[in-house]
Image: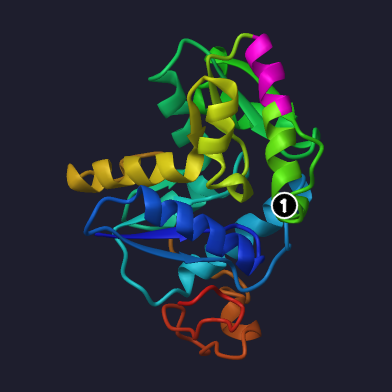
Amino acid sequence: MRLLVMNPNTTASMTASIRATAAAAAAPGTEIVATEPLWGPESIEGHFEGYLSAAAVLDRLATLDLAFDALVMAGFGEPGREGAQELLDVPVLDITESAAQMAMMLGHAYGIVTTLDRAVPQIRDRLLTAGLLQRCAAVRGTGLGVLELEEDAERTVELIIETARDAVRAGAEVICLGCGGMAGLQEKVAAALGVPVVDGVAAAVKFAEAVVGLGLTTSTGRSFAPPRPKVIGSWPLSAHLSPGGVQGSPRHTEFSAQTSGI
């Protein structure tokens, strides 16, 4: 089984961290391939960058010459998942819903610790759309920007723990790490809090393995039917913009030098 894990921003070091967490969670025999878009924002902190990222991710998927059995989208609370479900004929899981679904199996109410406070409404909207908000006790921001998560690992963990304690006081019995850039920190946070801590990347990998193992994929009967054939101007963009892009062949493009090893 091969799982593609998509970091929605263009920061390759974050892709590497996400890949490591996904590989650690994967079962023997599951191959993890991780990448990021060929263009787009270096981090996603708001709706504008989120929609740019969604387009860049779909562009990457449309031009990716790689077979895989499921896609894990490693952005928390960001748009684009539904578009990928229409585009691909394999299961698509995102870390927001995967983390929340797993947390609800472990406790009555869960909380989410994320980056900037401005991300909180976006995450709550995503949970509401997914039907998962009712059992969310709190969504709290640490005040750290996405790229700041990598600057001082010790300070990052301290702020996550401090913020998570506030979510626990608000009624959360399980904590979800609300950013792909927090991947791999769940054990340190759980040890300090004494409650289960769910990493969305790891949760999505395990759900993807289960769905593929059961022979299931996205329903195309209605909501996620494939896109209707039509002309889309200058699509896909990377076929025109990437130095390795091949004109007129949307399924064949060279990988950017800034992607993480694939």
Image location (x, y in percent) of residue 110: 54, 19
* Numbered range of the magenta stretch: 162-170
Q: Is residue 182 visible?
A: yes
Residue designated by label 1: 44
Closer to us: 180 or 64: 180
Q: Is residue 252 left or right of residue 149?
A: left
For residue 42: magenta?
no
- Give above or below for 16 relative to 206: below
- Give above or below for 136 relative to 14: above
Q: Say which quarter of the image contains residue 133.
A: top right
Image quadrant where one finds the C terminus? bottom left
- Give above or below for 30 relative to 131: below
Image quadrant where one finds the N terminus? bottom left
- Judged from this view, the residue extending furthest toward the left is 214
Image location (x, y in percent) of residue 176: 55, 30
Image location (x, y in percent) of residue 240: 62, 84
